[in-house]
Image (tube, rainbow, N blue to C red):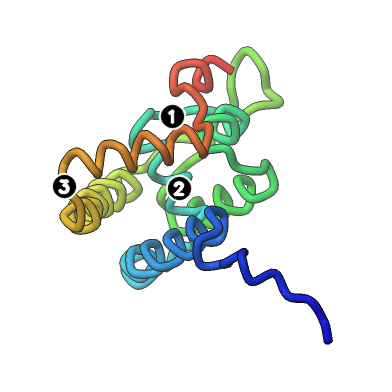
Amino acid sequence: MPQYDTEFDLREFLPYLLNQAAAATSVEFREIYKNRYGMLRTEWRVLFHLGRYGSMTAKSLCDLAALHKTKVSRAVAALERKRFLVREVLEHDRRHEQLILTPAGRAAFNDLNTEARAFDAQIAARFTPKETKVLRDCLIALAKLPDDEAALDG
């Protein structure tokens, strides 16, 4: 008869719990940006970073958002087709382009930013303010999010 590890419960395994929590919370918000603007996850992340930090190069965006350059390239192309951003070649280095939100991109960002804040508040309402702070601090530490200013300089 095979031996089973009855001590290990997948439902208490932190990576599993984090994945399940992320899936459960993100699917509802995904419906908002997908239904309103036809965006995929990477597209809204690119839009949000440009809306939050202003124009930047794709490389800076990759560093700041912790996204692979291929995904950013595809998202930028899709957002450009939707007329949410434009590219401007940099004068000092013609190999790179500055990504800039258009007025339509800015409007989409403002709309989704309002929705994201409300959605975040819904999630936070499940916890006390102290629990919410601990949860955010722990998730930030686990994600090892880049320092905004350092990523913008890169």
On screen, residue 120 above or below 2:
above
On screen, residue 154 above or below 35:
above
Residue ID at (79%, 76%): 3
Please, what secondary structure does the residue beneath circle 2 have?
helix
Answer with mark 2 or mark 1, whichever residue precedes in sequence: 2
| Amino acid type indicated by mark 2 | Arg
Answer with mark 3 or mark 1, whichever residue precedes in sequence: 1
Residue ID at (43%, 35%): 140
Q: Which residue is mark 3?
A: 128
The x, y position of residue 127, in whole percent, is: 20, 52
Answer with mark 3 or mark 2, whichever residue precedes in sequence: 2
Q: Nearer the viewer, residue 17 or 1?
A: 1
The x, y position of residue 95, in whole percent, is: 71, 26
Check the picture and name the quadrant holding the C terminus.
top right
| Amino acid type indicated by mark 3 | Thr
Residue ID at (43%, 41%): 139
Q: Nearer the viewer, residue 15 or 70?
A: 15
Residue ID at (69%, 48%): 70
Mark 3 to mark 2 CA distance (whole Å)? 28 Å
Q: In the rendered picture of this protein, how many numbered marks are placed on residues?
A: 3
The x, y position of residue 65, in whole percent, is: 52, 37
Q: Which residue is mark 2?
A: 45
